[in-house]
Amino acid sequence: MDGRQLSLLAGAGSAALLIAALGFQAAGYAPCELCILQRWPHVAAAAVALLVWWTGWVRGLAVLGMVAASIAMGLAIYHTGVELKLWAGPTHCSGTVGNLATMSAQDLLERLNTTPVVRCDEVAWRFLGLSMAAWNAVFSAGLAVVWGMAAKRASKG
């Protein structure tokens, strides 16, 4: 495969991950804030692939695709660590509602009404022991490699 084909393959991979995420959402698995955040780099990578297809420019765009896939991987690793309780996640989606002893009833009700229902530190689904975030990290790492191969092959030609 040449660099252009590899770029299109990597972009299609990001698009497939987005479709899978939307499929899980349609099946009733509501995404948390970190899940949604992980989608944006894949949107960018798919857009980069479209630019490669449209313009034929591979090397520079493939590097951008690799950066996008790497960001998706980093966010997914971060989310996986939050799920495994290796580190704290954002307090508004994985922490408590605050210090209950110092809150008024009105403050508590307001905080509860603005607290997301879907927590970032709870795993909604696992396959082979890995959560969706962990699988996203694995696939994003693979896509970053494919983007890197695309950039390397484009520079030879």
Image (cartoon, grey):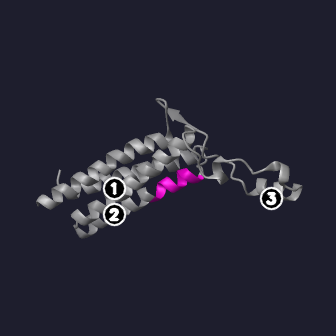
Check the image and report above or below for 129 versus 58: above
Q: Which mark is residue 11?
A: 1
Q: Secondary structure at mark 3?
A: helix
**Residue name at image x 51 percent, y 42 percent:** 80
At label 3, the amino acid type is: Glu
At label 1, the amino acid type is: Gly
Q: Quick one: 23 or 123, which is closer to the camera? A: 123
Q: Is residue 87 left or right of residue 17?
A: right
Q: Which mark is residue 110?
A: 3
Which stretch is magenta? Answer: 33-40
What percent of the width, then of the height, locates residue 126? 52, 34
Q: Residues within 10 Å of mark 2 (few under 14, many from 20)?
A: many
Q: Which mark is residue 135?
A: none
What percent of the width, then of the height, locates residue 31? 58, 49
The residue at the far front in this view is 102
Q: Can residue 14 be found in the magenta stretch?
A: no
Q: Quick one: 21 or 118, which is closer to the camera? A: 118
Can residue 34 be seen from the camera position used here? yes
**Residue name at image x 55 percent, y 52 percent:** 34
The residue at the far top in this view is 128
